[in-house]
Image (spheres, grey):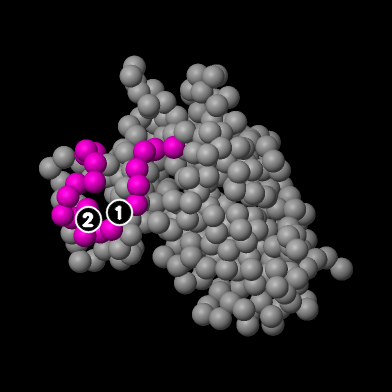
């Protein structure tokens, strides 16, 4: 009898819609490969849901994004229940989700990262934390949620009462230039891709709306930069103890007196939607979507 795969999707984070799209794409691919698939839109009580399916489930495919699905919580439940699961383990997931801790670990490993620090919202409103332009980031969100570039003459989004990403905020230098990303699979950096948004920066809308960005793979960058971005990506993956498939995001300032490469983050639960970057890079490397998903099932495990 074929394996039964529980595909977890949806969840409670602000990335719910993206997760549903990733999960649906994964479930369809798994069915076409002959697996028995249980697609689950995760609600409030993740633990109860996992406990109910544990006896009939061979592998959990974690297609959740954001809090609870990407930060080590679901991974911890799977470990306790002895359910093999895809993507990174508890610690790596938690570290990658915390931008401040991850950034310090990357810097310690010799990976170039943007300058910046953590500030309290009131501090920022009372006094500019650094020269504009700079970037505002929530400490633990994905998909560019809450990310803003604060430029000269613009009001800070932190002055808006609708700001909903906490009082402690990561502020970083704005790195001009080009957006690069690398897919890591099976302890190998597959290739670098350049993202060219049709307007503005590569925000939530650009990431998940067809036609809002152009993707160039392989990225048209010098060979030396390509070697560096592939090397730094794999080093970041290993520094956090990641496994399975991850994605590393960079800015590349190629101006005459530019800052060069800077790693922004590593994503342990990269999107698997029709507009997502990892499937695009994998396809360039000769790995179609079904092959990618099947490999992730074969790689699934518990760390304990």
Whether the residues at callouts 2 and 1 have beta carbons within 8 Å, the answer is yes
Span highlighted in magenta in the image: 113-133
Residue 167 image point, x, y percent: 30, 63
Residue 204 image point, x, y percent: 38, 52
Q: Name the quarter where the N terminus is drawn.
A: bottom right
Residue 134 image point, x, y percent: 27, 42
Q: Residue furthest front?
A: 108
Badge 2 element: helix
Q: Name the quarter where the C terminus is drawn.
A: bottom right
* Residue 86 marker: none
Residue 178 image point, x, y percent: 39, 31
- For the point 56% across and 81% down, which residue is it? 45
Estimate how packed mark 1 is, as few (under 14), some (14 to 19) or many (20 or more) residues with alpha carbons within 10 Å: some
- For the point 53% across and 45% down, which residue is it? 105
Badge 1 element: strand
Residue 278 visible to the viewer: no
Q: Is residue 163 left or right of residue 271?
A: left
Residue 104 visible to the viewer: yes
Per the image, the residue denoted by label 1 is 119
Per the image, the residue denoted by label 2 is 123
When asked about the image quadrant of residue 218, the answer is: top right
Estimate how packed mark 2 is, as few (under 14), some (14 to 19) or many (20 or more) residues with alpha carbons within 10 Å: few
Residue 123 on the magenta segment: yes
């Amino acid at each position: 009898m074929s394996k039964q795969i529980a595909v977890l999707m949806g969840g409670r984070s602000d990335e719910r819609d993206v997760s549903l799209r990733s999960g649906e794409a994964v479930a369809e691919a798994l069915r076409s490969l002959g697996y028995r698939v249980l697609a689950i839109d995760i609600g409030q009580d993740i633990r109860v849901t996992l406990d109910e399916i544990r006896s009939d489930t061979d592998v959990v495919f974690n297609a959740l994004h954001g809090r609870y699905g990407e930060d080590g919580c679901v991974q911890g439940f799977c470990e306790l229940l002895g359910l093999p699961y895809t993507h990174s383990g508890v610690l790596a997931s938690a570290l990658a989700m915390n931008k401040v801790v991850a950034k310090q670990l990357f810097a310690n490993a010799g990976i170039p990262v943007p300058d910046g620090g953590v500030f309290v919202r009131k501090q920022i409103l009372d006094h500019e934390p650094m020269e504009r332009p700079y970037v505002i980031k929530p400490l633990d969100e994905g998909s560019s949620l809450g990310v803003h570039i604060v430029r000269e003459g613009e009001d800070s989004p932190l002055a808006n009462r609708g700001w909903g990403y906490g009082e402690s905020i990561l502020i970083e230098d704005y790195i001009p230039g080009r957006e690069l990303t690398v897919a890591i699979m099976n302890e190998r950096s597959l290739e670098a891709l350049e993202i060219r948004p049709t307007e503005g920066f590569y925000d939530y809308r650009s990431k998940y709306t067809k036609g809002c960005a152009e993707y160039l793979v392989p990225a048209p960058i010098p060979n030396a930069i390509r070697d560096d971005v592939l090397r730094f990506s794999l080093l970041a993956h290993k520094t956090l103890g990641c496994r399975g498939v991850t994605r590393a995001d960079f800015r590349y300032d190629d101006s005459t007196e530019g800052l060069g490469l800077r790693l922004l983050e590593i994503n342990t639960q990269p999107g698997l939607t029709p507009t997502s970057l990892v499937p695009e890079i994998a396809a360039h490397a000769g790995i179609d979507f079904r092959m990618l998903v099947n490999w992730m099932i074969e790689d699934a495990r518990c760390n304990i």
